[in-house]
Amino acid sequence: MMFKKNAILKIILLLVFSDILETFSQFCFKKSALLSGPFQIKAFSDAVTFAKTSALSPFLWVALISVFLTFIIWATVLSKVDLSVAHPIASFSYILVPLVSIVFFHEKIAALGWVGIIFILIGAIFVSLSSKEKEDIL
Amino acid sequence: MKEQLFLILFLIVLTSACDTLCQLFLKSSINSLKFSVNSVKKVIIFILKLAVHPGAWIALTFSIAALFLWLFVLSKADLNFAFSVGSLHYIFIAFASKLILKEKVGITRWLGTISIVIGIILVAIS
């Protein structure tokens, strides 16, 4: 079966996609919070007003939908591979966020940051390789 | 100052513990469904089956608890510090998968997981 051979590659792609979705939902949450205006949450009633204003923002709903989609992908991935494989590979977001900062916000990354990114990549490759032992269940 | 640090450390560990429990409950619920997902239609059935599984709701509760704890930690602690300590979470999950879910965590997987933890700490402090 095709799926068997490329299984771990598909899993990685799904996880990267869900990481992108998660980053996107964080962006939308932040956007909806900013649009609700500067809020000083001091009492519970302030929090309720804040929640009410946010609930009217389309960004909040887009964020919630992408959180739900992220969950669907995560659950599907977990039905295919071990938790100890899927969870470390999902650390891709630690690479995505700095890369997005470079490309879109022209931020600079320190040498140590690059070393960190390489460590994460090597780690993800090792974890992916270790899952081959279980290919029969895929 | 020192008490504050211990409180933050404790809260980070607590966040990690909640998230680990969330993942364990979710994964064991999925395992108990013994459902093979190989088409979009099956994904929908799979999610519906999961939605009526009590384990998934326990997982959701722990996930919400972890989210609130984490937001609280971030409002108190230095971001780099929180992320660095938080990355130990990967080790917790690996141990929990091995001990509770009986997954086979071999030397390659351990090396990979540890490499990721080192990587996250380096990205956080850089």
Image (cartoon, rainbow, N blue to C red):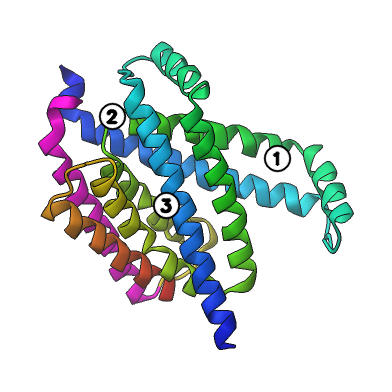
Q: Secondary structure at mark 3?
A: helix
**Residue named by callout 1:** A60
Local packing at callout 2 (Cα closer than 10 Å; few below 14, some 14-19, many 20+) is many
Name which quarter of the figure residue A10 lies in. top left
Vertical order, A85 against B11 (above or below)? above
Q: Position of residue B78 (x, y in %)?
A: 55, 75
Most common SS among magenta residues: helix
Q: Which is in the foreground here, disc 3 or disc 2?
A: 2
Q: Secondary structure at mark 1?
A: helix
Mark before the other along the chain sequence, 2 or 1: 1
Residue at 30% in and 20% down: B34
**Residue named by callout 3:** A93
The magenta-colored residue range is: A110-138
Apparent side of residue B106 relative to residue B57 in the rendered image (left or right): left
Q: Chain of mark 3?
A: A
Apparent side of residue A101 relative to residue A5 in the rendered image (left or right): right
**Residue named by callout 2:** A80
Name which quarter of the figure residue B46 lies in. top left
User: As shown in the figure, which amino acid type bears the numbered disc 1?
Assistant: Leu
